Amino acid sequence: MTRRSSTTPSIRDVAATAGVSYQTVSRVLNDSPRVNADTRSHVLEVIARLGYRPNRAARALGSGRSNSVTVVTANTTLYGYAATLQGIEEAARSEGFAVGVRVVESDGPADVRHAVEHVSDPDAGGVVVIAFDTAGAEVLRALPAKVPAVAATEAGGLTGVSRSMIFLDERQAAADATRHLLNLGHHTVHHVAIPSESGTSARRAGWRTALEDAGALVPEVLTAGWDVRSAYEAGVRLAAERAVTAVLCGNDDTALAVRRALYEAGRDVPGDVSIIGFDDVPGAAYWTPALTTVRMDFVALGRACLTAIAAELAGEPQPPVALSPPSLVVRESTAPRRNN
């Protein structure tokens, strides 16, 4: 008589017996559409044969890390952050992961330390850091090497960090936006920049390169914060300068604030001043005038980050990342320069 082993089969036992990855078993258990019918049927047969009883709260890997991901971010409301988080959540549902969010209050040492401690528990699962700013970047740099982590960053990633970093390369799109304005006859293009982890963002770099390539004057950069008030104040400064006829803004919120300052100064957009934003927020096409802007697919960026951390947790190779490059969307807020 054969005696049944008292050892409870694990999800890893199912994966090994079925000849598939842990992630495939997880997808079957979570009814993911990414598993074909034959594989699903085979995995379910193995589950029944082994008598495996899935525990949704069970630890996903031999390392004891849970089938979950914590997103560390300094902001959950700004469009780029929120859309990236949306993509992470969408992919997590497909992959069978639970998602938690840890907001890091600032880039101060205490806040960074608290965020790092929160996600460094051996049973805490993987980490996705939205490192579009100094707070996120400092958390990424401070994470212990043993913590599985992937980051969404500015173009080019962060220097001195040996982590998987995924980004949208907006440098070329910023250059294209600047050239679009120059081709409309504007002598130069002013820039209202958003904060950058490095202080020299890809958006700023693309803008500067386009001006230098054209032999155009490179104006002083006006730096705004994440708040629209600071962008409005930058817009007030630009509105007072009659020589300003074209402005590239660091994001669409900045463009909206600059547009308001120009309106209050009696300067028409695009008749007197052309404006280009960045990100293509959902309402940008419905402003008056509709905003010319650079489209950034942050949702796809978030999905790619979740796919990457899922692979790392499963001990699988990092999947190739194929993100659509940012692109200029021309609408009504840009026009040829008036000859005064």
Image (cartoon, grey):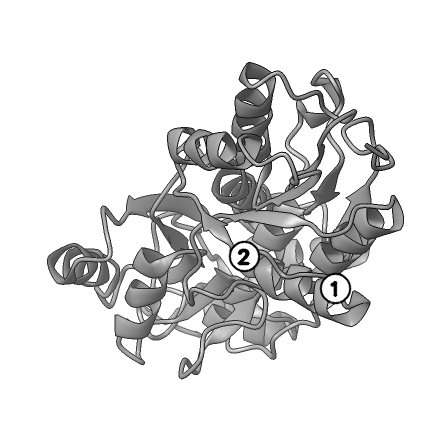
Name the residue beneath numbered marker 2: 306
- Cα–Cα span, label 2 and label 1: 34 Å
- Identified at 22% across, 62% down, the residue is 116
- 91 up-or-down from 269: above or below: below
Give the residue type at disc 1.
Answer: Ala
Q: Name the secondary structure under disc 1.
A: helix
Give the residue type at disc 2.
Answer: Leu
Question: Residue 280 sits in which quadrant?
Answer: top right
Look at the image and tell me whether residue 25 can be seen. no
Q: Residues within 10 Å of mark 2 (few under 14, many from 20)?
A: many
- 332 up-or-down from 203: above or below: above
Look at the image and tell me whether residue 81 can be seen. yes
- Identified at 77% across, 68% down, the residue is 215
Question: Residue 289 sits in which quadrant?
Answer: top right
Lower sequence index among marks 2 and 1:
1
Name the residue beneath numbered marker 1: 210
In the picture, the quarter occupied by the C terminus is: top right
- Identified at 72% across, 24% down, the residue is 269
Residue 176 location in percent, x, y?
79, 56
Mark sitting on residue 92: none
Residue closest to the eye, 249 or 112: 249
Question: Residue 287 sits in which quadrant?
Answer: top right
> Is 177 left, or right, of 227 in this rendering?
right
Residue 59 location in percent, x, y?
34, 60
